[in-house]
Image (cartoon, rainbow, N blue to C red):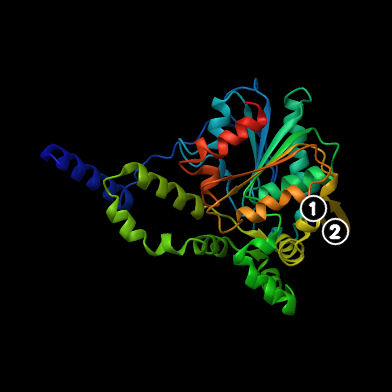
Amino acid sequence: MQQSDLVERATVSLRNAWGLTFGGGVEAVSPTPATVIHRELHRDLYRYGTGTGGRPVLLVPPLAVSIRCYDLRPGQSLAAHLVEAGRTPYVVDYGDMGYADRHLGFEEWVDDIVPGAIRRVSELHDGADVDVIGWSLGGTLSLLTASAHPDLPIASITALGTPVDYSKIPTMALARTVGRVTGHRPVTELTRLMGGLPAPLVQLAYRATAPQRELLKPWFVANNLHDTETLARMEAIDRFMAEMPGYPARLFYQMAEELVLGNGLHEGRITLGGNTIKLAELNVPVLAIGGSGDVIATADSVGAIVDVLTGAPSVRFETTPGSHLGLLAGPAARDTTWRHIDDFLGV
């Protein structure tokens, strides 16, 4: 390495070290331009881009995650990609969850929040059907909404990293085994007293899915001080995790009862508030994508969807490289996950 290269490397390393410690980071936050379309508690609606000329897409985030998942940073933003592809993407934002929201359950999302967002987006596009994309639990909300309300103006559903068969997730194996003996009460009763699963616990649980990343982070930073792009990706993930809100108590109870212990999605039916939703009644095309390196929603657990949606005109399953967040917003997502989405939506 020439002396000029060594000097440049040292200069970049010092600048990045300062940014990570005393400065504002190694890369300025640069979100995709977005406009507020509707404001209401737990259902703010934003439109990315500057116009409404393209076919509408609604991005449905999971609970306990900020909408940043769809707009992580430049080059790792599905929202920006859809804008560049000529679509008009929207996202529904649930905001923070606190003790006052402890009574909220899946019903609020499946029967109100998500259908309301779909209808608003459709109205903005002269009644056009809306392509719905949901990551993780956002995919679950999308699938349940389409199944419960087949009259909604939905063109298609794309579920990214959305588990359907929870028995195929190793990290859930212990919870399911213990739950057969104790039920969900030991965990859900504690969350009921707290009003839900607080944000710090959600953030800790997410970090625990990648212990090696957390343990080796100091070494990783030191070894990559000269590599601004690598550090910027790390910084974006850290920022994303730090913004994770909590789960409402009722919804967390339903997740434990219906999804994890009951494995209701794989059984093809979920009971919410006394009403049973049958996934066989979903009647739009579906694309499901699982990540080969995803430990939160293994590819097998996602792929089980093809045996459940018997009423859909088509169900397509693809596997891409990447972790749970990586398959959506990793550096390789543009050439894998997003390409499958483009092909499915006919972009």
Could you tell me which residue is drawn at 33 percent across and 51 percent down? 20
The quarter holding residue 179 reads bottom right
Q: Would residue 174 be visible to someone looking at this image?
A: yes
- Give the CA distance from mark 2 to mark 1: 7 Å
Q: Is residue 26 left or right of residue 90?
A: left
Quarter containing the C terminus = top right
Identified by mark 1, the residue type is Glu
Camera-nearest residue between 345 and 44: 345
Residue 26 point in image, percent of width and height? 34, 44
Q: Is residue 246 left or right of residue 278?
A: left
Residue placed under numbered mark 2 in the picture: 273
The image's mark for residue 107 is 1
Q: Are marks 2 and 1 in contact (CB under 8 Å)?
A: yes
Secondary element type, mark 2: loop
Secondary element type, mark 1: helix
Q: Would residue 99 be visible to someone looking at this image?
A: no
**Around disc 2, counting alpha carbons within 10 Å, would you say few (fewer than 14), some (14 to 19), or many (20 or more)?**
few
Residue 47 point in image, percent of width and height? 62, 31
The image's mark for residue 269 is none
Residue 295 point in image, percent of width and height? 56, 59
Which residue is the extreme one toward the top?
Answer: 53
Question: Along the polypeptide, which appears first: circle 2 or circle 1?
Answer: 1
**Around disc 1, counting alpha carbons within 10 Å, would you say few (fewer than 14), some (14 to 19), or many (20 or more)?**
some
